[in-house]
Amino acid sequence: MARVAVVTGSNKGIGLACIRALCKQLKPDDVVYLTARNPELGKKAVADLEKEGLKPRFHQLDISNKASVEALRDHLKKEHGGLDILINNAAIAFKSKDPAPFSEQAKVTNGVNYFDNAQAYHILSPLLRPNARVVNVCSFVAVMTWGKMGDDLKEQFRKLATEEELNTIVNKFIDLAAKDEHTKHGFPGTAYGFSKVALSAFTRLQDRIFEKDTARPGIAVFAADPGWVVTDMSSGSGKKNVDEGADTLVWLAMRPEGDLEGRGEMYSDRKLNKVFL
Ligand code: NDP
């Protein structure tokens, strides 16, 4: 059966490089969906890849818009009956000079990078077929952020049993940030870093659920760190180009049936790089 792959936020940057790599590494009959919230940008990216001899398909996807995610789900169900690779790549980051107050940055960044990614995951994951791979794009920044968190908060993350508990912690960060009291309670001073810690914790929780799923065996959820990559998000700074940044993400997505070592954890440069120590 042809495999079907989706990468969120793939009109540019690391997401686009994932599409390029998947088109090259999957079989000719397999289907790779480049998705973008702005159809013009998405279709332009598809046209650029076609000039390289690659043939991704396009579908609109705004992870912050539930109806948009549901429309993609319905399309995938109708056209292909399922999904084999999902790379949750879409994210935002405020620039360091952005004048928006921290309270707003905490709310908006965790809204997109955590809550909207989680929403997209829940809408699309019922389509996952046995042995599917999910890759949640996290960051080395999550490891740095973990090191700046208070011991009590770390213990809460280590003991997390449910997504509801995780949502409560993320909402507490947003609420405390609104009063500028987050650091007093052991939360870090980075909205972006915290959103990636939260997404890493989400990855673990979702993977545990699939580990016990006997109806759909072999599905694994991984977190991935692309490294420091030259993109719009990094304002053109970084040590890797986008293809190098996509390497670990696509390597995880392509891991063969039964190759589940390190499931639920984060990988950097194809090696385990656990966030929660
Ligand atoms: P870019 O800013 O270059 O690309 C981000 C992509 O996400 C764009 O396609 C953007 O669309 C899309 N996006 C943002 N919000 C939404 C949304 N609501 N719905 C759908 N798509 C959305 O970032 P990078 O390529 O650098 O980042 C890719 C991933 O890698 C992110 O998860 C990032 O956090 C992570 N990362 C990046 C690092 C780096 O050094 N660059 C380091 C570590 C992690 P649009 O073009 O419309 O804005």
Image (tube, helix red, strand yellow):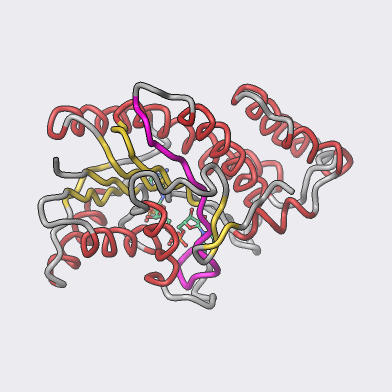
Q: Is residue 228 above or below residue 32?
A: below
| Left or right of 256, for residue 64 | right
Q: Position of residue 65 (x, y in %)?
A: 38, 33
| Position of the N terminus by quadrant | top left
| Left or right of 59, for residue 147 | right
Q: How many marks?
A: 0
Seen from this angle, which residue lies furthest front?
258
**Looking at this view, is 130 or 139 the one in front?**
130
Q: Residue at x 57, y 36 (%)?
A: 202
**Looking at this view, is 270 or 186 the one in front?**
270
Q: Position of residue 61 (x, y in %)?
A: 30, 41
**Looking at this view, is 107 or 201 the one in front?**
201
User: From which residue to which does the magenta span run?
Assistant: 216-233
Magenta stretch encompasses residue 91: no
In which quarter of the view is residue 159 placed? top right
Displayed-image quarter of ligand 1: bottom left
Main secondary structure type of the part rendered in magenta: loop
Q: Position of residue 258 (x, y in %)?
A: 38, 44
Q: Residue at x 53, y 44 (%)?
A: 113
Q: Is residue 35 above or below residue 127?
A: below
Q: Position of residue 59 (x, y in %)?
A: 21, 43
Q: Residue at x 66, y 43 (%)?
A: 106
In which quarter of the view is residue 97 placed? bottom right
| Left or right of 30, for residue 203 | right
Q: Residue at x 71, y 47 (%)?
A: 102
